[in-house]
Amino acid sequence: FTITGDHVVTATFEQVLTRRSLAVWLAERIFEPDAQPTGDGSFVDVDKTDVNYREIMLCVEFGLLAGYSKGEFVPEGTVTRAQLAAVLVKALYGSMFNPYSYKGMDTFSDAASFEGGWAEGYINLITKLGAMYGYDDGTFRPGDCAAEEDIVEAVFDRELNNGIFASGYCG
């Protein structure tokens, strides 16, 4: 999908958001166009010949995304709604955010119980900011796959608050 001009969206949404498309989307909005990874890292499935090596490695070096224990990045792997919430909060606040400070708010019935509650603080903050939303039944569905439209929603909501996600399309 593309976001261009002043609040104009041209979108063809994929069914789910992949780790590759998230890295590209983040890198286009956060890093300078000539920014390059400082390290010489790679993954068994992403090396310097990969078309999105720069974007993936910048996001890894910045702490937004990480690989898996077997040295894989899994670029075509899906991103859950919990993972997207965490990445968006990290992009906004970096290491200054303490996810434990937003735990225990009982905003959603399923956030604290999902995978030991690791994402609860991220989910509570990103929804408090209005950049992602839960469902009418009181759930967030953190284990569901995130869709590219979840990112577009975050872009528009953060633009209203002059967040960093606005820089990619509104100058």
Image (cartoon, rainbow, N blue to C red):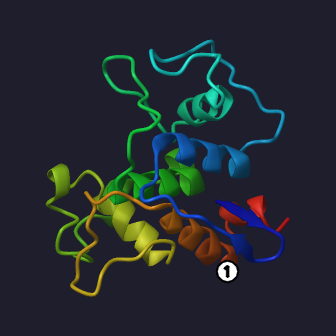
For residue 29, side relative to residue 14 (left or right):
right
Q: Quadrant of the N terminus?
A: bottom right
For residue 15, side relative to residue 8 (left or right):
left
Residue 140, can we see it?
A: yes
Q: Residue at x 67, y 29 (%)?
A: 54
Q: Secondary structure at mark 1?
A: helix
Kindly indicate the quadrant of the structure image that contains residue 141. Answer: bottom left
Q: Residue at x 70, y 69 (%)?
A: 10
Q: Quadrant of the C terminus?
A: bottom right
For residue 5, side relative to residue 78 (left or right):
right
For residue 167, side relative to residue 127 (left or right):
right
Q: Which residue corresponds to mark 1?
A: 160
Q: Is residue 17 above or below residue 33?
A: below
Kindly indicate the quadrant of the structure image that contains residue 162. Answer: bottom right
Q: Residue at x 44, y 38 (%)?
A: 76
Query: What is the x, y in percent for residue 35?
Result: 78, 32
Q: Nearer the viewer, residue 101 or 152?
A: 152
Kindly indicate the quadrant of the structure image that contains residue 70. Answer: top left
Query: What is the x, y in percent for residue 14?
Result: 49, 58
